[in-house]
Image: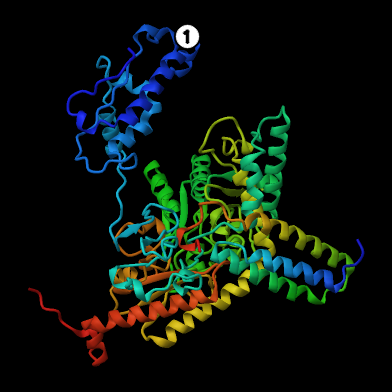
Amino acid sequence: MGGKIAPSWGADKCFVPALEKKREDKRQEFRSSLDSTENFRSLQTDPPSTHKPMAKVPVVRVLFTPRPQQGRTANDRPASAQAVVRLRRASVLTTRLLPIKNTTYLHVVHRVVTESIKSRELEKDELRPLYMDFQATTPMVCIFLPKYFTKIHKCCWGSYFMGLTQNILPKDQLSFTRNCSLLNKQLRSSIFFLRQDPRVLDAMLPYQVNYYGNPHSRTHAYGWESESAMEKARKQVADLISADPREIVFTSGATESNNMSIKGVARFYKPKKKHIITTQTEHKCVLDSCRVLESEGFEVTYLPVKNNGLIDIKQLEQTIRSDTSLVSIMTVNNEIGVKQPIQEIGHICQSKNVFFHTDAAQAVGKIPINVSDWKIDLMSISGHKIYGPKGVGALYVRRRPRVRIEPLQSGGGQERGLRSGTVPTPLAVGLGAACEIAQQEMEYDHKRVSMLASRLVQKIMSEIPEVVMNGDSEQRYPGCINLSFAYVEGESLLMALKDVALSSGSACTSASLEPSYVLRAIGADEDLAHSSIRFGIGRFTTEEEVDYTAEKCIQQVRRLREMSPLWEMVQEGIDLKSIKWTQH
Amino acid sequence: MAASSKAQVLSLYRMLIKESKKFPSYNYRTYALRRVRDAFRENHKVDDPKVQEQLIRKAWDTLALIQRQAQGHLGWDLACERQ
């Protein structure tokens, strides 16, 4: 089929002779290259048995949509022609899509292709959400990034405005330069918005990339390397809590560790002991495990806490019965930051022959822990709370005297049979590195965090009245501060403080609207519980961030209080409790 | 290795600071600068040569670490931190 190919209907007006000649040459080339079967096969995607015989090589015809022609040059070809040029390489494939004899509607194909991959350009000043995740275990904040297309600043649309529309400044007021203060005022670091320490990342990377053997394989060097790395990590974790490496079991996180310990101990000792004691301020995973056990026939006592968040030791002693198998109390509360008197509890439990489990996810690496001094039998450790990777944790299970656990995860008997499954070597190495770093930096971090925390609290409390710090002021870990602002609507305060990575309640309850059960347990009023904000301060928090947070907080609380009629009434001296609200 | 002179230690400090400034992430950058400064200040008065040597070795390791990590992980930095 040589010779000039006459364009079909509608195309004569757009027929470009020069282009057509070029195309024709190429067709000749293509046809000649198909003379040998190998060439044709190499162009094929199907296996040889299904390829068409060569005699039926399709001829590619091109159809253009009619366009008005005025001063046509090679450059202002219609868009469809350009598309044809681009799609030439796909011509062999497209003939299969549209099996019309001797013709190919490449233009149609082009349109189909471009229509399916439509990218929507953001309108000017339109906000674009970056990330929003309500189910995350650490609260993520919703960052809105406006995309500005000014000439100068085309490359730096990375500066962002946080929060609602009222916070957006008009373009001319904002400077996008390197020294932009807004660029530096970024997400507040919090212990709950945790970065991995770069040293942890550095330790993990080789195990992600190169040393990828299964640590449980005993027969090759990859396995040996991974196993030695895993054992080294185990030793690092054990050193942090003054335990023996054989007593550490790697898990997928503190939630799994909690589940394993509570359900495991309870079920193992079920024939004789059916009572479990825990508190009302525990983490959701502990409370949920206890609920499951209740449905299995156990009795669970949820100890109340005093107003300062600490449990009453005498009450605990009285509650322990002869058939109590486990007492589970967390070391540092994740919402209010109070530190329970673990040493005394441990001694009581030992004297009464009861196993003592503590969820130390927030405490490990931040306060010095000694499992033998504190007489702890089981302890949960979380990786990402100590600036390690997410998805790994550990459980300390005492060997002398032996604590027996019914394993939750059955399988090949790894990890002393308590938790079967391949240990994720890079994550375990990360956890080990994080523990080692935490041990070295504990003093420095503690000093710094206390300094920053007192700075934040003093700033806020000196500027605005009626602020309540939930939880005991002495017995606490300074990095977790929970403040309640009276006469301020909680949700609006949270929305106004969107650029600070904080949450009301804990992450596991952040999606629900009701106030935190922890605050309810310590006896906070409903309205105070609703308007409570938890600030987390960690290793990477800077003074600037703390100052910014305090400023923002003060500003927003003042603004919301201006609008609040309750606040007006309080200013006038009316006692709110004495008001009889009418019932319509 | 002979006991390092003051000049060597100072040059090591300068290198650490220079590399720390290259972290693309604000929090890591500020932490690295602060920690390096505080660590050198804290160990300023150490006399025991063995301890000194150990600390200096650790400082060299940290320098290598910072050099590796401060390149930023291409494209995986937060958009707002890309300057």
Q: Residue furthest right?
A: B2
Question: Of residues A336 and B60, which is closer to you in this image?
Answer: B60
Q: Position of residue A321 (x, y in %)?
A: 49, 55
Q: Residue at x 70, y 43 (%)?
A: A229
Q: Height in image: A212 above or below A463?
A: above
Q: Position of residue A33 (x, y in %)?
A: 46, 15
Residue A360 appears in the figure: no
Question: Of residues A15 and A474, which is closer to you in this image?
Answer: A15
**A558 displayed left or right of A66:** right
Q: Which residue is mark 1?
A: A37
Q: Height in image: A18 above or below A46?
A: below
Q: Height in image: A17 above or below A308?
A: above
Q: Residue at x 30, y 19 (%)?
A: A4
Q: Residue furthest left?
A: A584
Question: Of residues A242 and B40, which is closer to you in this image?
Answer: B40
Q: Position of residue A378 (x, y in %)?
A: 58, 51
Query: Mark 1 — on which chain does it sit?
Result: A
**A482 displayed left or right of A414:** left
Residue A126 in which image quadrant? bottom left
**Could you tell me which quadrant the N terminus of chain B lies in?**
bottom right
Residue type beneath disc 1: Thr
Q: Position of residue A10 (x, y in %)?
A: 17, 28
Callout 1 secondary element: helix
Question: Of residues A531 and B52, which is closer to you in this image?
Answer: B52
Q: Residue at x 24, y 21 (%)?
A: A6
